Image: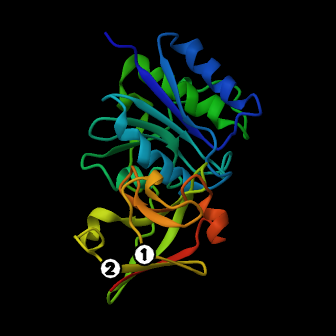
Amino acid sequence: MARPIITLTTDYGTGDHLVGVMKGVILSINPEVNIVDITHHVLAHDILDGAVTIAQAYSYFPPKTIHLVVVDPGVGTARRPILVASDQHYFVAPDNGVLSGVYDQTEALYVWNITSEHYFRNPVSSTFHGRDIFAPCAAWLSKSWQTAAFGDPIEDFTRFSIPKPKVDGTAFKCIVLKVDTFGNLMTNLKIADFPALVVPDAKFTIRAGKTEIRKLLPTFASGTPNEPFAVTGSSGYLELCVNKGNASRVLGIGRGAEVIVQIE
């Protein structure tokens, strides 16, 4: 039988002991677990960034993977810890909306408020629920798979809408959702929803900062050095790039910036 998989997505960074401690807690409960780091560099305290990150990643893992997501600025408050079962995956996270992108992508969805404290480490720190609640619950789930044993089912879980482009005639008002390590700017415009951008001989203008972009190219290497252009990113969203450069710096914009796509 395949070893169970638990993924980790946090805003903890890797400069402290936090991630290592969570892994130690998991392995102490179930040493057979295969732990995979998705990222520990979600923007600090940024629930939207966490929601976008896990939504982009979780579906590439095998069925029955448990995704542990801790972006938790409300740690120690009345916000609930939750266990979520989607059609093929499980999630353990705070009930603060960090799974909103997952909720948008799944048809079957079941959510439990985690209240069974015998699964927690004791005493529970008010500042490190990743260690004392989320990690042990994910580990115990990987041993038993008894979701109902963790608490009561709920339907009032927290979710928010990931920002969508606004249509204004033949113009789409978008925002930058993420800036990746290379400086590429991922917008919230999904190419599949706007096929007019990719029809043969499509003509459009993308306004980003003070720059106008008129090229949608197939690869990063297709671009002229130092000249911004657009690509269809690996997650299907319109991205702004510079060949071997940093589009965020070249365009002078970052996360949250407005990008206008005008079909001509």
Does residue 179 appear left or right of residue 232 in this picture?
Answer: right
Residue 150 visible to an observer of this rendering: yes
Residue at left 60%, top 81%? 210
Which part of the image, by quadrant, shows the C terminus?
bottom left
Position of the N terminus, as image quadrant, is top left
Quarter residue 208 falls in: bottom right
Q: Give the class, few, some or many, for how many residues have Cα within 10 Å of label 1's Cα (few <14, many ≥20).
A: some
- Tell me the residue at 56%/33% (across/down): 134
Q: How is the image coloured?
A: rainbow
117 shown above or below 155: above
SS for callout 2: loop
Looking at the image, is 241 positioned above or below residue 194?
above
Residue to which mark 2 is pinned: 203
Residue density around tag 2, few if under 14, some if 14–19, many if 20 or more, within 10 Å: some
Q: Which residue is outermost to the right?
A: 16
Which percent across, then down, holds residue 167?
35, 82
Q: Is residue 32 above or below residue 78?
A: above
Contact (CB < 8 A) between labels 2 and 1?
A: yes
Q: Does dot 1 land on a helix, a strand or a loop?
A: loop
Q: Amino acid at mark 1?
A: Arg
Q: Position of residue 259 (x, y in %)?
A: 50, 76
User: Which percent across, then down, holds residue 148?
Assistant: 36, 32
Task: Give the left or right position of residue 153, taking residue 18 as reference.
Answer: left
> Which residue in the protein does label 1 denote?
214
Q: Amino acid at mark 2?
A: Lys
